[in-house]
Image (spheres, helix red, strand yellow):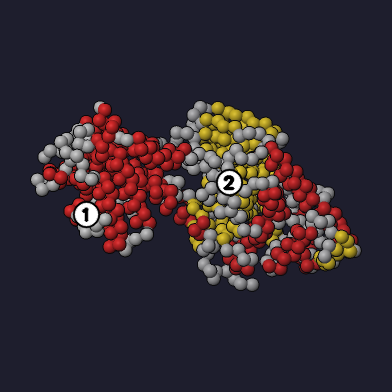
């Protein structure tokens, strides 16, 4: 046997080992390379994914993030006392006042978005949202009187009714009430990403009740996101995200209640004064989480015919909507990003570039 | 140093030409993963290895890969790099095992080892660089099986080539030292 | 024809055959093998439960008790606080990635199997 051993020199054994090493490495990296942090804040479940595993002080990150989010939650709360509540009181009085600093960015974006969506996105209609029973922890009826709705819509309050001079504000409509429900989570997620960066984190996902944004990349691979089927337990689709991408969805299955056999959900159409109809959900993928949040709400209100035109107008290229029958439509740019599970494959359509009625 | 081609160089050139031809034929065989081929040209690599030594085998293999991709217009394409990955992996294994020939290992064992190394090397390269899809390993078992089978065929072909009276004198056996 | 077979050839071919065979069994192993239920609750470290034995799991939370039923390799939210019954309506969790949420009790149920794990779930 000695001649066999002599035939294999030591260098050759090393070479063989080096050759086999990638196989071992490939086998071992099949499992999680990330840490997960789950806590309650901002009125919902916050889920933070951190890469690489074991590199962060999770307790420190949790306490910093949750403190920040709780402050934002209290400040921006649509019906409990806070900065938005105080602002609402002062707007109705009609005098000039200095805006609480935390509310200014929401008002600024709100005004821009109202213009960009032709009034479909209107955070000044808090009165209407409250009338439908959504300004309480457990939304409930009865729904508002149709005559009352008609009166309100005859001369509806708008973001444009807020006169802004730097940090000074003045309200010009007696029914004006701010509700930043369609915007606040986007801003909260953006702030949390910034906070993580300040704390030295380079690769993470901030997920607030299912809406999320990414920071950096987990090594050489993209982030793998599972999209849950709203009407069941299964995975509807999977999406791969790069760094700095946000994924937000607005759906009729979130907050709501049943009234006389009808499903009353929290996305109110400013044109009809009633919960929006025609789309079960709208999902937006964008680098700006505030825009993604507002756009998801806007597309749901826009409905099955007009949503592509509104998406284009907002500069949203990657969007997807779910119709009440469960079928899915996506923009051409969204189509390559989403991998559907077998079951939904057959009912997926790409919205044509020229579909929808331009307003 | 003289640049006039010696007899060993001529043989390497001839073998490289043969190997290129085989690789071109190889390229016409369909495969589940684009670029991964059974590696029939390894017969030539083996003959070169056993008749002329490892460095000659390396020369033949590299000439074959570059030459064939020049002929097919695939130089610097993913297919070229895949060929290179497979070829170098096969050469590495052969370099390690060649010392065992002819006493403990015959052309069949060498061919099977080379074919598997070729496929594994190509697959790892494809997975790491070209298609890092997490489900790519699903294609590996049939590819490995194909490698085992082509390895056996290659080994048998090599054995019959080596048995040819025109080649026999050049082949290393128990009484001779390797040529180079 | 003389194939020049030596003992080394036999070893190599047998090793190769073993490699090929095990690659088949490892890659194409039935998926039902390692499925487990992972419960992530705010403020707690994730808890894992196997699905091979039928059992009931009770998880306490700020809003009350969430009862989880594990039966025949599947899991579901049997009862959970919340006026809309969102957790219960998710139904049976059967495959890798399936999930149910109870916001009042601040917890997420998700099945984890052999598939590539998701970094985050969008819903």
Please state the chain letter of the residue tagged with numbered disc 2 in the rendered image.
Answer: C
* Residue A193 relative to residue A166: left or right: left
Residue at x 79% of width, y 55% of height: A102
* Residue A341 relative to residue A198: left or right: left
Can you see residue B126? yes
Looking at the image, how many numbered discs can be counted on the residues?
Answer: 2
Q: Which residue is mark 1?
A: B9
Q: Which residue is mark 2?
A: C121
Residue at x 33% of width, y 48% of height: B88
Badge 2 density bin: few <14, some 14–19, many ≥20, Cα 10 Å: many
User: In this orientation, which residue lies closer to the viewer: B93 or A89?
Assistant: B93
Badge 1 density bin: few <14, some 14–19, many ≥20, Cα 10 Å: some
Q: Secondary structure at mark 1?
A: helix
* Residue A54 relative to residue A31: left or right: right
Quarter containing the N terminus of chain B = bottom left
Can you see residue B148? no
């Amino acid at each position: 046997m000695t001649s066999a051993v002599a035939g294999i020199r030591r260098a050759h054994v090393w070479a063989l080992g080096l050759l086999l090493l990638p196989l071992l490495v490939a086998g071992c990296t099949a499992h999680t390379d990330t840490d997960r942090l789950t806590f309650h804040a901002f009125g919902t479940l916050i889920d933070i994914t951190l890469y690489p595993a074991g590199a962060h002080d999770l307790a420190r990150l949790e306490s910093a993030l949750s403190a920040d989010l709780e402050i934002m939650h209290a400040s921006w709360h649509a019906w409990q006392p806070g900065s938005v509540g105080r602002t609402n009181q002062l707007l109705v009085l009609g005098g000039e006042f200095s805006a609480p600093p935390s509310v200014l960015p929401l008002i600024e974006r709100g005004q821009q978005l109202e213009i960009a969506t032709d009034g479909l996105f209107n955070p000044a209609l808090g009165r209407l949202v409250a009338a439908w029973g959504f300004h309480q922890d457990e939304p409930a009826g009865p729904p508002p009187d149709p005559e009352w709705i008609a009166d309100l819509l005859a001369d509806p309050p708008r973001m444009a009714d807020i006169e802004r001079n730097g940090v000074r504000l003045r309200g010009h409509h007696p029914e004006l009430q701010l509700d930043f429900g369609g915007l606040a989570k986007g801003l909260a997620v953006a702030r949390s990403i910034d906070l993580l960066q300040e704390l030295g984190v380079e690769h993470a996902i901030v997920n607030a009740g299912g809406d999320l944004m990414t920071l950096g990349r987990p090594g050489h691979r993209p982030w793998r996101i599972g999209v849950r089927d709203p009407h069941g337990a299964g995975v509807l689709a999977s999406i791969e995200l790069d760094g700095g991408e946000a994924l937000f969805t607005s759906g009729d299955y979130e907050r709501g209640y049943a009234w006389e056999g009808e499903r009353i959900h929290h996305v109110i159409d400013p044109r009809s004064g009633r919960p929006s109809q025609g789309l079960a959900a709208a999902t937006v993928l964008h680098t700006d989480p505030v825009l993604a949040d507002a756009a998801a709400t806007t597309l749901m209100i826009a409905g099955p015919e007009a949503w592509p035109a509104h998406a284009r107008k907002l500069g949203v290229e990657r969007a997807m909507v779910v119709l009440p029958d469960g079928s899915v439509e996506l923009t051409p740019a969204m189509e390559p990003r989403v991998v559907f599970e077998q079951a939904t494959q057959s009912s997926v359509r790409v919205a044509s570039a020229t579909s929808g009625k331009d307003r | 140093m003289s640049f006039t081609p010696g007899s060993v160089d001529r043989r390497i050139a001839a073998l490289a030409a043969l190997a290129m031809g085989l690789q071109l034929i190889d390229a016409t065989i369909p495969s589940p993963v684009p670029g991964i081929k059974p590696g029939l040209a390894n017969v030539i690599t083996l003959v070169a290895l056993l008749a002329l030594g490892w460095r000659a085998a390396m020369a033949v293999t590299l000439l074959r890969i570059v030459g064939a991709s020049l002929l097919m217009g695939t130089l610097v394409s993913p297919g070229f790099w895949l060929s290179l990955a497979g070829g170098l992996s096969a050469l590495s294994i052969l370099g390690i095992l060649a010392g065992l020939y002819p006493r403990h290992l015959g052309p069949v064992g060498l061919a099977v080892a080379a074919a598997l190394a070729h496929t594994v090397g190509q697959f790892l390269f494809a997975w790491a660089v070209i298609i890092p899809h997490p489900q790519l390993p699903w294609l590996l078992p049939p590819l490995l099986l194909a490698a085992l089978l082509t390895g056996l065929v290659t080994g048998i072909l090599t054995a019959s080539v080596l048995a040819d009276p025109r080649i026999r004198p050049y082949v290393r056996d128990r009484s001779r030292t390797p040529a180079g | 024809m003389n194939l020049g077979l030596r003992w080394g050839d036999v070893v190599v071919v047998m090793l190769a055959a073993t490699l090929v065979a095990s690659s088949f069994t490892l890659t194409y192993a039935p998926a039902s093998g390692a499925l487990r239920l992972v419960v992530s609750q705010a403020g707690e470290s994730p808890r894992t439960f196997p699905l091979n034995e039928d059992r009931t799991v009770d998880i306490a939370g700020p809003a009350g008790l969430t009862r989880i039923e594990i039966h025949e390799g599947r899991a579901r939210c049997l009862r959970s606080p919340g006026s809309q019954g969102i957790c219960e309506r998710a139904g049976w969790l059967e495959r890798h990635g399936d999930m149910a949420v109870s916001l009042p009790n601040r917890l997420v149920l998700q099945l984890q199997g052999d598939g590539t794990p998701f970094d985050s779930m969008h819903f």
